[in-house]
Image (cartoon, rainbow, N blue to C red):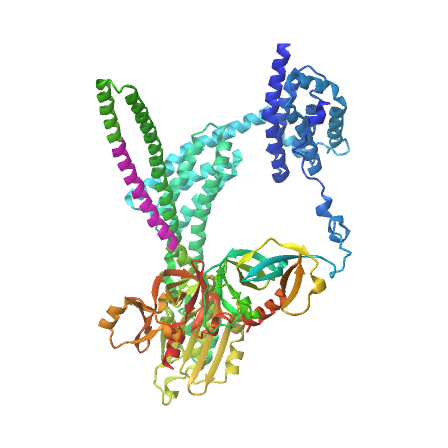
């Protein structure tokens, strides 16, 4: 009897352990359809079935048998499990799950007496595995069932693959280290030989991931050598890490290699993506992106003006030829990546410091115990002094350790903070570009265009520090050169026809942001023609602007020149601003407009002649602010600095502007609204404010 | 006997008809035969000063504690200011000013109303639990109409009319 009880206990324990596994595996299988989950399920069902058979009760294993049949059919791809079928199996699983709560006697009685229910569940399960639903054995199934010979050959191939890695890795490492220490270009031949060995072995062993990585490494190194591009430390580090990955893969036994590669598959993907991304960036930079539109379009236009076609075909007019300084653009990504890696490496010592702090805690516990000893030995002075001496020593040790760990943790935290700042600034720069970067090289472009069309032009660019949303960068790169070209060729007269005007024509290109809008103005002092004629000529570009939710206004006056104003909506532009308080309300001024922030006393001492605007008065607040020293913001105007006097300075903030609605724009100089610390803040358009105050 | 104790507590919801069938044929979404006039609406009661108001709670998005407002003298009289909520800026309607009531002066919470396109807030002294009431029989087209619910006088607030005002204000 005790033997049966033991079996029942074992059976209960098996059910307890495996029913959970069956349930999670089946539910996951329903979601993800991964065949391995079915294998796990089948294994667990088999465990239950075996322990049920040991009970030597007829009905115990009936359900498990039926379950196993269904699941193994599904595992062999001969049966598609529908959601209802999975429900049924789960119900059957619940039968075993619920058995746990009964005593041994009850379980025996239940298994014997409730044959009806058991047979019902089993019949339901058998209906899943009905003959009409079972598919015939497919050829793929036969393939997957590898014979022992095949398994053996697979093992040999993996062994070969491992050997290839071991042999090649050291060669690659040597070559890379050599080029790193001697600062030479990488020797391509031995590395590509080694990589080819790995690639060949990986293909025959069927390890596609390793093939991908080796391929990416090979491509990258070959590209560097072919184009004479020097390798930077970060890329070298990446190559070494790839190599280290291969080393780690080779360190496992041949059988475990597949699992190891599965574990590392994320790393492999990331590394090969990085290597490939360097390639695509470099390839992208070589044949400048807009070279397509350059030569075809410029030549005929210039030839109509009269310039020689030889001069034009010399290829100097590629717009992006003027942007050679941007070649190192990918270094931005490297810097961010470098900072991220550094943060991760700084976190490791911090976590080890925390672990050490845990050990200190146990030391303190010991001291507590000693204190208890003191209480027991209060009469025995010798023991007391000994304990006290020991404790003092331990305490000193603890304090020194604490100091040390705090110092290290602090140092690394500081390091992390710096790196996070780098990342933040980097991301900020990704989000927006300075207008100066967009128009870099445009002066040379204008000069060249003028020379080819025998004119004298001076291009004046203002607003170089205005941040342009990254989404507009490419658009402006296409748009602005074309507009400039059109203006120089069609609007500007040759010097001998510029009567009453300076010989050198002036074109001004300016950018400014107004709330969430970017305003670009191109003004020239050329001959000026009918605005409708210009719009007909620029139809393609105007369509381009309107397709990108922009707007262009053209105004032209004969003999005085033409003005093109283009505006774009910018989404998610952060305005770096200073936030002030006036009469309990918050106002912000863009940092772009600010000259200096000083206090009232300094203002009266140093800028006694400067004009000042009291914000309370201009906002119509009658009561005067009673404060000792109000903040004064100097803003730049064309005629000198003007001071804005606020009540309080709140802080610096990056605001996301929302365009002003009718309600917000009742105050004419408020350009947009935003939210700061859960309070509404109004963004002031300084230029409008100054105009109003002058009037 | 013992089997009855077994609970199939892990059995899942398999009544897939609920999700599959189209709305017109679905028994769960039967159209009500009651006309809209007889239907009961859920009302949110709130109090400003000594006056009890109710508003159709289908427009109520959330009730939040009162926040600091941005005020401007050039705003219309019935707008008491702007508040920030979920990163946007909403107007707060000054109900006492709109209906010539007296307010207590220190509102405790702000009720945010939304019709999907526009949002605004109304400051109230306190808000009670919503209840269902057959309100439509006694409502006219004015902004405030009186209602007697359980021997107590309420003003039914026509929120749709306030949305009309807000729409005019936000669109140029």
Is A510 in front, or is A352?
Answer: A352
Q: Is residue A251 above or below residue A479?
A: above
Which residue is the extreme one toward the front?
Answer: B151
Which quadrant does the N terminus of chain A fall into? Answer: top right
Can residue A206 be spotted in the picture?
Answer: yes
Can residue A318 be spotted in the picture?
Answer: no
Q: Residue at x 39, y 54 (%)?
A: A424
Which quadrant does the C terminus of chain A fall into? Answer: bottom left
- For this view, does B25 lie left or right of residue A604? right
Q: Is residue A83 above or below residue B103?
A: above
Residue A418 shown in magenta: yes
Quarter of the view holding residue A587: bottom left
The x and y percentages for residue A482 are 46, 72
Residue B1 shown in magenta: no
Q: Is residue B35 above or below residue A276?
A: below
Is B99 in front, or is A406?
Answer: B99
The x and y percentages for residue A185 are 33, 47
Question: Magenta segment, which residues?
Answer: A398-424
Q: Residue at x 61, y 34 (%)?
A: A35
């Amino acid at each position: 009897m005790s033997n049966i009880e033991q079996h029942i206990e074992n059976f209960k324990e098996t059910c307890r352990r495996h029913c959970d596994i069956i349930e999670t595996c089946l539910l996951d299988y329903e979601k993800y359809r991964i065949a391995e989950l079915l294998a796990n399920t089948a294994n667990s069902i088999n465990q239950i079935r075996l322990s049920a058979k040991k009970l030597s009760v007829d009905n115990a294993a009936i359900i498990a048998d039926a379950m196993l049949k269904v699941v193994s059919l599904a595992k062999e791809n001969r049966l598609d499990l529908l959601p209802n079928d999975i429900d049924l199996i789960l119900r059957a699983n619940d039968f075993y799950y619920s058995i746990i709560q009964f005593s041994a006697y009850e379980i025996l009685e239940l298994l014997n007496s409730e044959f009806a229910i058991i047979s019902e569940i089993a019949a339901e399960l058998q209906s899943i595995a009905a003959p009409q639903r079972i598919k015939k054995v497919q050829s793929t199934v036969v393939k997957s069932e590898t014979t022992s010979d095949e398994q053996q050959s697979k093992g040999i191939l993996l062994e070969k693959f491992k050997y290839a890695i071991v042999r090649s890795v050291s060669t690659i490492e040597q070559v890379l280290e050599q080029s790193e220490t001697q600062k030479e270009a990488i020797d391509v031949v031995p590395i590509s030989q080694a990589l080819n060995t790995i690639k060949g072995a990986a293909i025959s062993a069927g390890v596609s991931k390793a093939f991908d990585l080796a391929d990416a490494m090979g491509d990258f190194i070959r590209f560097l050598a072919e184009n004479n591009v020097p390798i930077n430390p970060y890329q070298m580090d990446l190559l070494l890490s790839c190599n280290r990955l291969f080393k780690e893969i080779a360190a496992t036994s041949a059988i475990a290699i597949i699992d190891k590669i599965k574990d590392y598959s994320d790393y492999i993907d990331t590394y090969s993506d990085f290597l490939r991304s360097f390639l695509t960036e470099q390839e992208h930079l070589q044949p400048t992106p807009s070279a397509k539109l350059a030569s075809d379009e410029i030549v005929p236009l210039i030839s109509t003006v009269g310039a020689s076609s030889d001069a034009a075909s010399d290829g100097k007019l590629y717009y992006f030829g003027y942007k050679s300084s941007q070649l190192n653009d990918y270094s931005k990504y490297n810097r961010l990546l470098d900072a991220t890696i550094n943060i991760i490496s700084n976190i490791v010592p911090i976590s080890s410091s925390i672990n050490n702090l845990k050990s200190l805690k146990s030391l303190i516990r010991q001291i507590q115990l000693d204190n208890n000893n003191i209480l027991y030995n209060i009469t025995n002075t010798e023991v007391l002094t000994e304990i006290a001496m020991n404790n003092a020593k331990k305490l000193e040790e603890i304090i020194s350790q604490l100091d040390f760990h705090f110092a290290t943790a602090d140092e690394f935290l500081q390091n992390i903070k710096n790196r996070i700042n780098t990342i933040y600034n980097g991301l900020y720069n990704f989000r927006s570009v300075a207008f100066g970067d967009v128009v870099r090289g445009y002066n040379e472009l204008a000069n060249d265009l003028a020379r080819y069309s025998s004119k004298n032009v001076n291009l004046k660019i203002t607003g170089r520090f205005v941040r342009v949303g990254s989404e507009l960068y490419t658009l402006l790169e296409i748009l602005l050169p074309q507009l400039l070209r059109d203006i120089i060729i069609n609007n500007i007269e040759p010097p001998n026809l510029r009567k009453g005007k300076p010989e050198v024509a002036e074109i001004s290109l300016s950018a400014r942001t107004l709330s969430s809008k970017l305003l670009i103005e191109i003004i020239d002092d050329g001959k000026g023609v009918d605005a409708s004629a210009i719009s007909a000529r620029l139809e393609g570009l105007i369509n381009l602007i309107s397709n990108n939710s922009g707007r262009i206004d053209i105004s032209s006056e004969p003999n005085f020149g033409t003005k093109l104003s283009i505006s774009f909506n910018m989404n998610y532009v952060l305005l770096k601003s200073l936030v002030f308080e006036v009469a309990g309300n918050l106002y912000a001024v863009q940092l772009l407009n600010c000259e200096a922030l000083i206090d009232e006393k300094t203002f009266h001492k140093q800028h006694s002649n400067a004009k000042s605007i009291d914000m309370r008065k201009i906002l119509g607040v009658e009561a005067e602010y009673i404060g000792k020293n109000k903040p004064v913001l100097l803003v730049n105007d064309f005629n000198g600095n003007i001071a804005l006097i606020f009540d309080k300075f709140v802080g610096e903030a990056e605001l996301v502007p929302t365009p002003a609605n009718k309600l917000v724009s009742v105050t004419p100089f408020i350009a947009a609204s935003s939210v700061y610390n859960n309070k509404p803040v109004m963004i002031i358009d300084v230029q409008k404010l100054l105009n109003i105050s002058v009037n | 006997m013992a089997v009855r104790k077994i609970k199939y507590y892990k059995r899942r919801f398999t009544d897939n008809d609920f999700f599959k069938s189209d709305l017109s044929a679905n028994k769960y979404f039967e159209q009500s035969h009651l006309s809209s006039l007889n239907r009961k609406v859920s009302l949110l009661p709130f109090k400003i000063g000594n006056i009890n108001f109710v508003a159709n709670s289908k427009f109520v998005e959330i009730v939040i504690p009162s926040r600091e407002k941005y005020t401007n003298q050039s705003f219309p009289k019935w707008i008491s200011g702007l508040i920030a909520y979920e990163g946007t800026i909403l107007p707060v309607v000054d109900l006492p000013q709109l209906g010539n009531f007296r307010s207590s002066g220190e509102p405790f919470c702000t009720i945010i109303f939304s019709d999907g396109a526009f949002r605004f807030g109304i400051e109230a002294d306190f808000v009670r639990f919503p209840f269902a009431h057959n309100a439509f029989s006694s409502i006219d087209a004015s902004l405030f109409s009186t209602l007697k619910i359980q021997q107590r006088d309420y003003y039914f607030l026509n929120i749709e009319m306030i949305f009309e005002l807000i729409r005019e204000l936000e669109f140029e």
